[in-house]
Image (cartoon, helix red, strand yellow):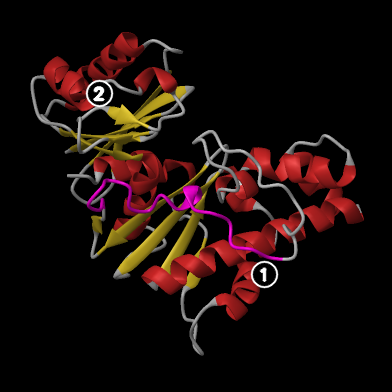
Protein backbone atom coordinates (compact mmCIF):
# COMPACT_ATOMS: atom_id res chain seq x y z
CA UNK A 1 0.00 0.00 0.00
CA UNK A 2 1.25 3.49 -0.90
CA UNK A 3 0.46 6.74 0.88
CA UNK A 4 0.84 10.04 -0.93
CA UNK A 5 0.69 13.46 0.71
CA UNK A 6 0.18 16.74 -1.11
CA UNK A 7 1.50 19.50 1.15
CA UNK A 8 -0.18 22.69 -0.02
CA UNK A 9 -0.18 26.21 1.32
CA UNK A 10 -3.78 26.01 2.52
CA UNK A 11 -4.58 22.29 2.68
CA UNK A 12 -2.72 19.02 3.17
CA UNK A 13 -4.21 15.98 1.48
CA UNK A 14 -3.45 12.27 1.98
CA UNK A 15 -4.36 9.41 -0.33
CA UNK A 16 -3.73 5.67 -0.04
CA UNK A 17 -3.40 3.62 -3.23
CA UNK A 18 -3.18 -0.13 -3.60
CA UNK A 19 -0.83 -1.80 -6.08
CA UNK A 20 -3.31 -1.28 -8.92
CA UNK A 21 -3.63 2.45 -8.23
CA UNK A 22 -7.10 2.10 -6.71
CA UNK A 23 -7.88 4.68 -4.05
CA UNK A 24 -8.43 3.12 -0.61
CA UNK A 25 -8.45 6.17 1.63
CA UNK A 26 -8.43 9.95 1.35
CA UNK A 27 -8.10 12.64 4.02
CA UNK A 28 -7.76 16.43 3.82
CA UNK A 29 -6.98 18.97 6.57
CA UNK A 30 -5.99 22.65 6.66
CA UNK A 31 -2.24 23.23 6.59
CA UNK A 32 -1.03 25.10 9.71
CA UNK A 33 -0.33 28.59 8.40
CA UNK A 34 3.29 29.64 8.86
CA UNK A 35 3.95 26.95 11.49
CA UNK A 36 6.69 24.54 10.43
CA UNK A 37 6.64 22.30 13.53
CA UNK A 38 2.86 21.95 13.34
CA UNK A 39 3.13 21.05 9.66
CA UNK A 40 5.55 18.20 10.39
CA UNK A 41 3.27 17.00 13.20
CA UNK A 42 0.24 17.09 10.88
CA UNK A 43 1.97 14.94 8.26
CA UNK A 44 3.01 12.38 10.87
CA UNK A 45 -0.48 12.25 12.39
CA UNK A 46 -2.18 11.82 9.02
CA UNK A 47 0.11 8.92 8.15
CA UNK A 48 -0.34 7.16 11.49
CA UNK A 49 -4.13 7.56 11.39
CA UNK A 50 -4.27 6.25 7.82
CA UNK A 51 -2.18 3.19 8.62
CA UNK A 52 -4.35 2.44 11.63
CA UNK A 53 -7.45 2.56 9.45
CA UNK A 54 -5.86 0.53 6.66
CA UNK A 55 -4.40 -2.06 9.01
CA UNK A 56 -1.22 -2.44 6.94
CA UNK A 57 2.17 -0.70 6.78
CA UNK A 58 2.65 1.71 3.90
CA UNK A 59 5.26 3.61 1.97
CA UNK A 60 5.07 7.41 2.20
CA UNK A 61 5.69 9.95 -0.55
CA UNK A 62 5.29 13.70 -0.14
CA UNK A 63 4.74 16.37 -2.77
CA UNK A 64 5.90 19.81 -1.68
CA UNK A 65 6.09 23.35 -2.96
CA UNK A 66 9.67 24.26 -3.78
CA UNK A 67 12.34 21.59 -3.70
CA UNK A 68 15.00 20.01 -1.52
CA UNK A 69 18.50 21.35 -2.07
CA UNK A 70 20.98 18.61 -2.99
CA UNK A 71 23.66 20.73 -1.32
CA UNK A 72 22.09 21.22 2.13
CA UNK A 73 19.14 18.81 2.20
CA UNK A 74 16.95 21.73 3.23
CA UNK A 75 13.90 23.17 1.49
CA UNK A 76 14.24 26.08 -0.94
CA UNK A 77 12.06 28.12 -3.31
CA UNK A 78 8.80 27.21 -1.54
CA UNK A 79 5.99 29.77 -1.62
CA UNK A 80 5.01 28.32 1.77
CA UNK A 81 7.89 30.28 3.20
CA UNK A 82 7.95 28.59 6.62
CA UNK A 83 9.38 25.52 4.84
CA UNK A 84 12.37 27.32 3.35
CA UNK A 85 15.65 26.47 5.03
CA UNK A 86 14.08 23.59 6.96
CA UNK A 87 15.17 19.90 6.81
CA UNK A 88 11.62 18.75 6.02
CA UNK A 89 12.42 15.26 4.78
CA UNK A 90 14.70 14.49 7.72
CA UNK A 91 12.19 15.82 10.24
CA UNK A 92 9.29 13.82 8.81
CA UNK A 93 11.47 10.70 8.70
CA UNK A 94 12.38 11.24 12.35
CA UNK A 95 8.71 11.73 13.30
CA UNK A 96 7.65 8.54 11.49
CA UNK A 97 10.77 6.47 12.18
CA UNK A 98 11.22 5.44 8.55
CA UNK A 99 12.36 6.60 5.11
CA UNK A 100 10.05 8.83 3.10
CA UNK A 101 10.41 10.08 -0.45
CA UNK A 102 9.80 13.67 -1.40
CA UNK A 103 9.47 15.61 -4.67
CA UNK A 104 8.28 18.94 -5.96
CA UNK A 105 4.51 19.08 -6.45
CA UNK A 106 4.84 19.65 -10.21
CA UNK A 107 7.03 16.54 -10.46
CA UNK A 108 4.37 14.60 -8.59
CA UNK A 109 1.70 15.89 -10.96
CA UNK A 110 3.76 14.79 -13.97
CA UNK A 111 4.48 11.38 -12.42
CA UNK A 112 0.82 10.71 -11.72
CA UNK A 113 -0.19 11.49 -15.28
CA UNK A 114 2.73 9.44 -16.66
CA UNK A 115 2.02 6.34 -14.56
CA UNK A 116 -1.73 5.93 -15.03
CA UNK A 117 -3.07 9.17 -16.46
CA UNK A 118 -3.11 11.09 -19.72
CA UNK A 119 0.55 10.28 -20.40
CA UNK A 120 0.39 6.56 -19.64
CA UNK A 121 2.74 4.62 -21.91
CA UNK A 122 4.64 7.70 -23.14
CA UNK A 123 8.42 7.69 -22.88
CA UNK A 124 8.70 11.41 -22.05
CA UNK A 125 5.95 13.37 -20.28
CA UNK A 126 6.15 17.05 -19.39
CA UNK A 127 3.68 18.14 -16.73
CA UNK A 128 2.78 21.81 -16.37
CA UNK A 129 1.15 23.60 -13.44
CA UNK A 130 -0.61 26.83 -14.44
CA UNK A 131 -2.00 28.35 -11.27
CA UNK A 132 -0.90 30.89 -8.69
CA UNK A 133 2.58 30.01 -9.91
CA UNK A 134 3.93 28.17 -12.93
CA UNK A 135 5.86 24.93 -12.55
CA UNK A 136 6.89 21.91 -14.54
CA UNK A 137 7.97 18.32 -14.08
CA UNK A 138 9.66 15.80 -16.37
CA UNK A 139 9.07 12.05 -16.31
CA UNK A 140 11.18 9.74 -18.47
CA UNK A 141 10.35 6.04 -18.70
CA UNK A 142 8.09 6.33 -15.66
CA UNK A 143 10.67 8.02 -13.41
CA UNK A 144 10.92 11.64 -12.31
CA UNK A 145 13.94 13.41 -13.78
CA UNK A 146 15.46 15.48 -10.96
CA UNK A 147 18.60 16.66 -12.73
CA UNK A 148 22.12 17.34 -11.51
CA UNK A 149 21.04 20.41 -9.52
CA UNK A 150 17.59 19.23 -8.51
CA UNK A 151 15.83 21.77 -10.74
CA UNK A 152 14.85 19.74 -13.82
CA UNK A 153 11.52 20.98 -15.13
CA UNK A 154 11.73 24.43 -13.49
CA UNK A 155 10.31 25.87 -16.67
CA UNK A 156 8.50 28.76 -15.02
CA UNK A 157 11.73 30.57 -14.15
CA UNK A 158 13.15 30.76 -17.64
CA UNK A 159 12.63 33.99 -19.59
CA UNK A 160 9.45 34.25 -21.65
CA UNK A 161 10.41 33.89 -25.33
CA UNK A 162 10.01 37.21 -27.18
CA UNK A 163 6.97 38.00 -29.27
CA UNK A 164 4.88 40.95 -30.44
CA UNK A 165 2.52 40.58 -27.47
CA UNK A 166 5.28 41.47 -24.98
CA UNK A 167 7.36 43.90 -27.05
CA UNK A 168 7.54 47.30 -25.43
CA UNK A 169 6.40 45.95 -22.06
CA UNK A 170 8.66 46.15 -19.04
CA UNK A 171 9.46 42.60 -17.88
CA UNK A 172 7.28 41.96 -14.81
CA UNK A 173 9.27 41.36 -11.60
CA UNK A 174 9.31 37.81 -10.23
CA UNK A 175 9.52 36.72 -6.60
CA UNK A 176 12.70 34.79 -7.52
CA UNK A 177 14.51 38.12 -7.91
CA UNK A 178 14.58 38.19 -11.69
CA UNK A 179 12.14 39.76 -14.12
CA UNK A 180 10.26 38.49 -17.16
CA UNK A 181 10.10 34.85 -16.05
CA UNK A 182 7.52 32.66 -17.78
CA UNK A 183 5.64 32.61 -14.47
CA UNK A 184 5.22 36.39 -14.58
CA UNK A 185 3.38 36.07 -17.90
CA UNK A 186 1.43 32.81 -17.57
CA UNK A 187 0.28 32.42 -13.95
CA UNK A 188 -3.23 33.29 -12.77
CA UNK A 189 -2.09 36.57 -11.18
CA UNK A 190 -0.12 37.32 -14.37
CA UNK A 191 -3.23 36.87 -16.52
CA UNK A 192 -5.14 39.31 -14.31
CA UNK A 193 -2.21 41.77 -14.31
CA UNK A 194 -1.94 41.63 -18.10
CA UNK A 195 -5.63 42.43 -18.48
CA UNK A 196 -5.36 45.32 -16.02
CA UNK A 197 -2.26 46.64 -17.80
CA UNK A 198 -4.00 46.60 -21.18
CA UNK A 199 -7.50 47.76 -20.16
CA UNK A 200 -7.32 49.33 -16.71
CA UNK A 201 -9.91 46.81 -15.43
CA UNK A 202 -9.04 44.74 -12.36
CA UNK A 203 -10.64 41.34 -13.02
CA UNK A 204 -9.91 37.87 -11.72
CA UNK A 205 -9.14 35.16 -14.33
CA UNK A 206 -12.56 33.56 -13.92
CA UNK A 207 -14.21 36.94 -14.55
CA UNK A 208 -12.11 37.42 -17.68
CA UNK A 209 -13.20 34.00 -18.95
CA UNK A 210 -16.87 34.69 -18.22
CA UNK A 211 -16.84 38.08 -19.92
CA UNK A 212 -15.00 36.71 -22.95
CA UNK A 213 -17.68 34.03 -23.29
CA UNK A 214 -20.31 36.77 -23.15
CA UNK A 215 -18.69 38.61 -26.05
CA UNK A 216 -16.32 41.07 -24.32
CA UNK A 217 -13.66 41.72 -26.96
CA UNK A 218 -11.03 43.02 -24.50
CA UNK A 219 -11.32 39.90 -22.35
CA UNK A 220 -11.16 37.67 -25.42
CA UNK A 221 -7.99 39.49 -26.48
CA UNK A 222 -6.44 38.88 -23.07
CA UNK A 223 -7.07 35.13 -23.38
CA UNK A 224 -5.69 35.15 -26.93
CA UNK A 225 -2.45 36.78 -25.71
CA UNK A 226 -2.18 34.15 -23.00
CA UNK A 227 -2.57 31.36 -25.56
CA UNK A 228 0.17 32.67 -27.84
CA UNK A 229 2.55 33.16 -24.91
CA UNK A 230 1.86 29.67 -23.61
CA UNK A 231 2.46 28.27 -27.10
CA UNK A 232 5.86 29.98 -27.44
CA UNK A 233 6.93 28.84 -23.99
CA UNK A 234 5.88 25.23 -24.66
CA UNK A 235 7.57 25.26 -28.05
CA UNK A 236 10.85 25.72 -26.20
CA UNK A 237 10.05 22.63 -24.12
CA UNK A 238 9.32 20.63 -27.27
CA UNK A 239 12.57 21.76 -28.91
CA UNK A 240 14.53 20.72 -25.82
CA UNK A 241 12.77 17.57 -24.56
CA UNK A 242 10.59 16.52 -27.50
CA UNK A 243 7.97 14.91 -25.21
CA UNK A 244 5.21 12.72 -26.54
CA UNK A 245 2.75 14.31 -24.11
CA UNK A 246 2.42 17.69 -22.38
CA UNK A 247 -0.21 17.63 -19.63
CA UNK A 248 -1.60 20.86 -18.21
CA UNK A 249 -2.76 21.17 -14.61
CA UNK A 250 -3.67 23.96 -12.21
CA UNK A 251 -6.53 26.43 -12.31
CA UNK A 252 -5.69 27.90 -15.73
CA UNK A 253 -5.52 24.47 -17.38
CA UNK A 254 -9.30 24.65 -17.87
CA UNK A 255 -9.27 27.87 -19.93
CA UNK A 256 -11.53 27.35 -22.95
CA UNK A 257 -9.86 26.57 -26.26
CA UNK A 258 -6.35 25.94 -24.91
CA UNK A 259 -6.05 22.37 -26.14
CA UNK A 260 -7.15 23.24 -29.66
CA UNK A 261 -5.48 26.60 -30.22
CA UNK A 262 -2.14 26.35 -28.38
CA UNK A 263 -0.80 23.54 -30.65
CA UNK A 264 -1.73 25.67 -33.66
CA UNK A 265 0.24 28.59 -32.22
CA UNK A 266 3.32 26.58 -31.27
CA UNK A 267 3.82 25.19 -34.80
CA UNK A 268 5.94 28.11 -36.17
CA UNK A 269 8.26 27.91 -33.15
CA UNK A 270 9.01 24.17 -33.14
CA UNK A 271 12.13 23.12 -35.04
CA UNK A 272 10.51 20.26 -36.95
CA UNK A 273 8.36 19.68 -40.01
CA UNK A 274 6.32 17.12 -38.04
CA UNK A 275 4.88 17.77 -34.56
CA UNK A 276 3.25 14.80 -32.89
CA UNK A 277 3.45 16.10 -29.30
CA UNK A 278 -0.04 16.08 -27.79
CA UNK A 279 -1.36 18.69 -25.37
CA UNK A 280 -3.69 17.02 -22.85
CA UNK A 281 -5.81 17.80 -19.84
CA UNK A 282 -5.04 15.74 -16.71
CA UNK A 283 -6.91 12.47 -16.35
CA UNK A 284 -6.82 12.71 -12.55
CA UNK A 285 -7.52 16.44 -12.30
CA UNK A 286 -6.81 17.97 -8.91
CA UNK A 287 -5.86 14.53 -7.56
CA UNK A 288 -2.79 14.17 -9.77
CA UNK A 289 -0.39 15.77 -7.28
CA UNK A 290 -1.32 13.58 -4.32
CA UNK A 291 -1.46 10.45 -6.50
CA UNK A 292 1.99 11.24 -7.89
CA UNK A 293 3.37 11.53 -4.37
CA UNK A 294 2.14 8.00 -3.70
CA UNK A 295 3.77 6.78 -6.91
CA UNK A 296 7.21 8.03 -5.76
CA UNK A 297 7.58 4.47 -4.45
Q: Is residue 93 left or right of residue 259?
A: left
Front-lying residue, 106 or 12? 106
- Residue 88's place in the image compared with 2, above or below, is above
- Looking at the rendered structure, the secondary structure element under dot 1 is helix
State the mark number for residue 261. Answer: 1
Instruction: Write the residue at 38% across / 35% down.
Output: 66
Q: Residues within 10 Å of mark 2 (few under 14, many from 20)?
A: many
- Quadrant in which the C terminus appears: top left
- Using the rendered image of the protein, determine whether residue 80 is visible from the camera's viewpoint: yes
Magenta stretch: dominant secondary structure: loop
Mark 1 or mark 2, which is nearer the start of the sequence? 2
- Residue 198's place in the image compared with 59, above or below, is below
- Quadrant in which the N terminus appears: top left
- Residue 261's place in the image compared with 154, above or below, is below
2 vs 1, front mark? 2
Q: Is residue 36 left or right of residue 34?
A: left
Front-lying residue, 149 or 43? 149
State the mark number for residue 88. Answer: 2
- Looking at the rendered structure, the secondary structure element under dot 2 is helix
Instruction: Write the residue at 80% across / 36% down.
Output: 203
- Using the rendered image of the protein, determine whether residue 243 is visible from the camera's viewpoint: no
Q: Is residue 115 magenta?
A: no
Q: In 3D space, how far apart are the residues under numbered discs 2 and 1 (Cα atoms)?
A: 41 Å
Whole-percent x, y for residue 235 in the image: 53, 69
Front-lying residue, 196 or 30? 196
Front-lying residue, 248 or 158? 158
Residue 239 lies in quadrant = bottom left
| Residue projecting furthest to the bottom | 273
What are the residue bounds of the magenta stretch?
A: 146-163
Whole-percent x, y for residue 208 in the image: 79, 45
Dot 2 and dot 1 residues touching (CB under 8 Å): no
Whole-percent x, y for residue 186 in the image: 62, 49
Amino acid sequence: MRIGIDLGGTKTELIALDGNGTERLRRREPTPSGDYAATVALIARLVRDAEQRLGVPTTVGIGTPGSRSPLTGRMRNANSTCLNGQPLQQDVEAALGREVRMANDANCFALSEAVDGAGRGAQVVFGVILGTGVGGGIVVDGRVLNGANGVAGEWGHNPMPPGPDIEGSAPPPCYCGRAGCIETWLSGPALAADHRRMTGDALAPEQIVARAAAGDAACAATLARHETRLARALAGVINLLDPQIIVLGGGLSALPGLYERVPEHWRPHVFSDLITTRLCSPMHGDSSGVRGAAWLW
